[in-house]
Image (spheres, helix red, strand yellow):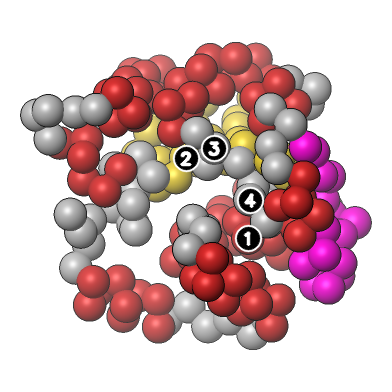
Amino acid sequence: MFITNPEIEAYLKSLVHINDSVLEKMENLGHKLNFPIVDRLVGNLLYIITQIKKPKLIVELGSGFGYSAYWFAKGLEDGKVVLNDYKEENINLAKKFFKEGNLYEKAIFEVGDAVENAKKYNNIDILFLDHEKSRYLEAIKQLENNLSKEAIIIADNVLWHGKVIEEDKDKKTEKINEFNEYMSANFKTSILPLRDGVLIALKK
């Protein structure tokens, strides 16, 4: 199921002009490997939110080879983005891309369980969820006290290919629905029907 009309999505994507050869390499690699990246529509949104928020600390859960974190890093003025992935080869690739883009000093690279790694950090200004979808609710509950007073929470894939509105939901979709409902009840929350659905929330 398409979340947005593919022609509208193509039009929106055409309006995001990337003058960064490293980002283009990362997109090409993602498409070649069929690796799930947020792509430039969501990447540009992350960049804009970072520019507005001016965070000191961004923590990502599920960084892959660093595509979304690279957008965050580009938007940072004075802060760090923490990348988390359970695969060391993904983090090593991310390091390579960040070095090539002269953004290495803006990043902290972690390998292992993303939620457990994130617990080491306090006063998180932006928390980005893009790891196992069934663990989103667990992650926010465990990391709520690690957020700064006016933190922003961003979560990708919260419409899950439109499955969230199906009557016969699988367990993963049910978990995503539970997360969306929890966020709507406990945070100031909006879901953008961009790509596969992007949730943006503020602490109440």
Tell me the residue at 43%/26% (across/down). Answer: 134
Of labels 3 and 1, earlier in sequence is 1
Mark 2: few/some/many CA within 10 Å (<14, 14-19, 20+):
many
Q: In the picture, residue 185 is in which quadrant?
A: top left
**Image vertical order of residue 64 relative to residue 23, above or below:** above
What is the CA distance from the residue labelled 2 to the residue labelled 1?
Answer: 15 Å
Of labels 2 and 1, earlier in sequence is 1
Q: In the picture, residue 93 is in which quadrant?
A: bottom right
Q: Is residue 105 magenta?
A: yes
Which amino acid is tagged 2? Answer: Ala
As drawn, the label of residue 155 is: 2
Q: Which residue is mark 3?
A: 131
Residue 201 drawn at (x, y percent): 45, 35
As drawn, the label of residue 67 is: 1
- Secondary element under disc 3, as helix, strand or loop, is loop
Read off the magenta span: 95-111
- Secondary element under disc 1, as helix, strand or loop, is helix
- Report if the CB atoms under discs 4 and 1 are less than 8 Å apart: yes
